[in-house]
Amino acid sequence: MKKATRKRVARTTGAKATPKTTPKSAPRSAPKSYPPVPAEGPLIGAHMSVAGGPVTGIERALAVRARALQIFTKNANQWKGKPISDEEATAFRAAWTASGLAPVVAHDSYLINLASPVGSLREQSVEALADELLRCEVLGIAFLVAHPGAHVGSGVLEGCDRAAESIDEARALAPAASVILLLETVAGQGTTLGRKFEELARMRSGVARRDLVQFCFDTCHVHAAGYDLTTDQGYEETFREFDAILGLESLRVFHVNDSKNERGSHVDRHEHIGKGKIGVEAFARLMRDPRFAAVPKLLETPKGADGVVMDRRNLALLRRLAEEPQGGSDKRRRGVQ
Ligand code: FE
Ligand code: FE
Ligand code: ZN
């Protein structure tokens, strides 16, 4: 799939492109084994696999009592996804409604590089992003999280402007899509763009439909990129900067991941909440921050062997942190139980 000779893929979804053929195994209908999620409590959840069809993502979210969900709408390591059939889309929407899950967001493919200086790769990325937008539209998903891309030596500003151009081109290919693109903060490995809030601002300022470009804040990435979330002062300063440069109202999704690596390492390795270099205090601050009460917070932490235990544990911790009375973190700091 990494060979440059690979044929470019055509669009695979969209109202007119929806295939008429029924898949061999009928898509599964609404999940049966789990009760709907409670309407109360913090808006937390996790990224879930959709192996077996989009509807299985809903089932997996319910299995850990999540209230929010992120999925890939196709294999994230492939350019081309199996088209989403009408039946699959209907089953997904029905299961979603029945589930009580509030926000469901999608994440785009890892292969896409909107900032690529290589024309053919950029073109392929634009087509793939258009396809991702249409797949979201078909499933009724309002937000698509996207990595801004890498400039591959061509320069930060040029890369940002190229990414903005690519977003516009993808929008032109997918004019029906009203899906909001959430550019994700990145750790800054290699020449990846989005390690600084200013870079994300530059991208947004370059697109025609600024209202359709907002942001996803990944705690692991922001920490690895060099921002401080570990102290009261650092936390406030980081969000003050975000607000000044991007606007807090455009922060629509959090990825809540602790980091295996130090602040400023530019290495993107997720760790369980409270077990990494960010530490539990930062997540306590975030969970209790009234500015973000309505913003979904999604885990992308390692799943472990059975796929549910670690998510349940991390979600339980986040819930506890959210409910902890003010000053709870001070007690924890002093070692008081
Ligand atoms: Fe991501
Ligand atoms: Fe992330
Ligand atoms: Zn990451």
Image (spheres, helix red, strand yellow):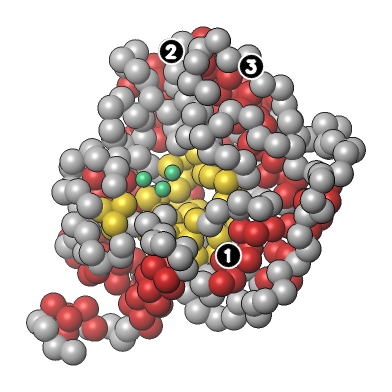
Q: Amino acid at mark 3?
A: Arg
Q: Residue tagged by mark 3?
A: 8
Q: Residue tagged by mark 1?
A: 60
In the figure, 111 relative to 76: above or below? above
Describe residue 224's horizontal placement relative to residue 149 as left or right: left
Describe residue 98's horizontal placement relative to residue 86 as left or right: left
Which of the two labelled residues, at mark 1 and mark 3, occupies the earlier sequence position? 3
Circle 1 SS class = helix
Per the rendering, the mark at residue 117 is 2
What is the x, y in percent for residue 300? 41, 55
What is the x, y in percent for residue 93? 75, 59
Q: Residue furthest right?
A: 20
Circle 3 SS class = loop
Task: Judge by depth and name the residue closer to the eye, 254 or 121.
Answer: 121
In the figure, 288 relative to 159: above or below? below
Which of the two labelled residues, at mark 2 and mark 3, occupies the earlier sequence position? 3
Per the rendering, the mark at residue 323 is none
In the figure, 134 relative to 328: above or below? above
For the point 58% across and 15% down, the residue is 6
Describe residue 76's horizontal placement relative to residue 59 as left or right: left
**Which one is in front in this view, the residue at disc 1 or the one at disc 2?**
1
What separation in Å lies between label 1 and label 2 (alpha carbons)?
Answer: 38 Å
What is the x, y in percent for residue 187? 30, 40
What separation in Å lies between label 2 and label 3 (alpha carbons)?
Answer: 17 Å
Task: Judge by depth and name the residue closer to the eye, 167 or 55.
Answer: 55
Q: Dot 3: few (<14), some (14–19), or many (≥20) neighbours within 10 Å? A: some
What separation in Å lies between label 1 and label 3 (alpha carbons)?
Answer: 33 Å
Q: Amino acid at mark 1?
A: Arg
What is the x, y in percent for residue 40? 55, 81
**Which one is in front in this view, the residue at disc 2 or the one at disc 3?**
3
Report the quarter where the C terminus lies.
bottom left
